[in-house]
Image (cartoon, helix red, strand yellow):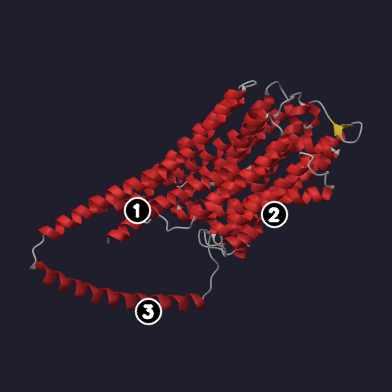
Amino acid sequence: MGYLQTSSTSFKATKWLGFVTAVWVQAISGNNYTFSNYSDALKTLMNLTQLELNNLSVAKDVGKAFGLLAGLASDRLPTPVILLIGSIEGLIGYGTQWLVVSRRIQPLSYWQMCIFLCLGGNSTTWMNTAVLVTCIRNFRRNRGPVSGILKGYVGLSTAIFTDLCAALFADDPAKFLIMLAIIPFAVCLTAIVFLRETPPAATIEEEKEESKYFNLFNVVAVIVAVYLLAYSFIPNPSHVLSSVFSLILLVLLASPLAVPAHAFINSWNLNRFKNQEDVERQIQEPLLREDKTQEKIQEKTAEEAAKAVVERTRAVEEEKAVEVVKRRPVIGEDHTVFEAMSTVDFWILFLSFLCGVGTGLAVMNNMGQIGLALGYADVSLFVSMTSIWGFFGRIISGTVSEYYIKKAGTPRPLWNAASQILMAVGYILMAVALPGSLYIGSIVVGVCYGVRLAVSVPTASELFGLKYFGLIYNILILNLPLGSFLFSGLLAGLLYDAQATPTPGGGNTCAGAHCYRLVFIIMAVACVIGFGLDVLLGIRTKKIYTKIYMSRRSKKLASASNLQ
């Protein structure tokens, strides 16, 4: 008995320790969004036009299309193997880019660079799939906060890498790339040891305990985000200040370890108290009751055996009935990939996701050139702001959408709809190009892009189930390379080159608000279309979210009545 309680105590602590390592993995797996930090070095080194540079960024995002492999593997391979594959891919992909930018090897041909960019981009799909699928299954009663926290740290990762590079290496693109190669590899090796799939919460009390711990994770994440944002606005920090900043940042990222430590101590104290109660009860009970107790146990055992036979017979009959009448799963039940893709709701979610993340990626991939066109010599601030405000969008939307499901059964897609219309306003502000509009626009786009990513993940699991969630999630993520190709590679690249003037030695440049004005207007229209699709999906899925709300409410009432 004591062994079981001890193992239960360590099990709970290990579960939360696994979530902490998952947070660390997400904090370093947003390297795909850092292309603007070294894109200018690639453009100069390889004498590229803007269209060619944008197609390099598309190659990076095309790597995510091969995330289908990670989705298939998530149902067949253990989490550590998936993490190992992703870490090795990232080491090779970004390590090769570092060799080129640092001039340790001769510049590779254009198609070879596309392959290594694709490899680096694909590495994050393995990391994200391993972390998201495992954690949502472990904490399935708190899918919104889990998605918000994990996706939030993905958003922060760009700012973490950018600010660390600025603090330690003075924005050297070569040293930035070596960070992208080595740090994710080391962090994934840590997660391989601790991140495992475990049984979810079984009671309302466990669910409430999880919610309290997630609130602590949210607080720490907000502190990290504010800290990064504050550092971004410090002009020309000294070497000592930069070193202190880096040290404090590492301490903040390690601080969530307090959660598994507290869970272990709390469970250990609770088990010790229960052991004392059991001993006292055994001493106080008279020995004459033992015979009666034994008789009751035997009676209960016989009754339970009879019930088990009846239930087994009933289960067999139900299975036969299901085999006779095979019906298609309804929304809210487990779908196979083909069953999900044969529904209208899947394609509404897919297309609305494309309108949001595709346009957002176009801004992130082109932020370097957008800033230069509008007269900003240093664009690292805008890259950091988009990342940090994207974090706020992810973490707030995950928690708030979960709260309103529990409180009123509000469909999650309606939060996506709100983000789409706000994102359209952000693009209009950028198109107008008033003084300071890039600051406001980067904040708005960052927030809305974050909402889109954080809300769509639990939405897919609620509509199509968790059984094949890994693969369904990676099919939705195909929107990242597709959106990058349509809005960044084609739209932004072609329209920019049409406005640009050639430069000596190859390449081109453009200065002025007109360079991207038409791009922003078209992307605003795409967001309005996405808004309409999300509203439609919210209306179509109202019943399933009402069902989720009623189910949780009835469990809560039942738990309260049992306590009385």
**Disc 1 residue crowd, few under 14, some 14–19, many 20+, Cα 10 Å:** many
Count of numbered circles in the view: 3
348 relative to 508 in the view: left or right: left
Coordinates of residue 230 in the picture (x, y in percent): 56, 25
289 relative to 111 in the view: left or right: left
Pointer 1 with pointer 3, Cβ within 8 A: no
Q: Which amino acid is tagged 1?
A: Thr
Q: Quadrant of residue 314?
A: bottom left
Q: Residue at x 49, y 35 (%)?
A: 251
Pointer 2 with pointer 1, Cβ within 8 A: no
Does residue 214 sit above or below 243 in this rendering? below
Disc number placed over residue 9 in the picture, else none: 1
- Looking at the rendered structure, the secondary structure element under dot 2 is helix
Q: Which residue is mark 3?
A: 313
Q: Which amino acid is tagged 2?
A: Ala
Disc with the residue nearer the chain's start (2 vs 3): 2
Q: Which amino acid is tagged 3?
A: Thr
Q: Nearer the viewer, mark 2 or mark 1?
A: 1
Q: Residue at x 52, y 31 (%)?
A: 248
Disc number placed over residue 65 in the picture, else none: 2
Pointer 2 with pointer 3, Cβ within 8 A: no
The answer for how far apart the CA atoms under marks 2 and 3 are is: 46 Å
Q: Nearer the viewer, residue 133 or 435?
A: 133
Q: Residue at x 47, y 36 (%)?
A: 220
Q: Quadrant of residue 433?
A: top right
Q: Nearer the viewer, mark 1 or mark 3?
A: 1
**Disc 2 residue crowd, few under 14, some 14–19, many 20+, Cα 10 Å:** many
362 relative to 460 in the view: left or right: right
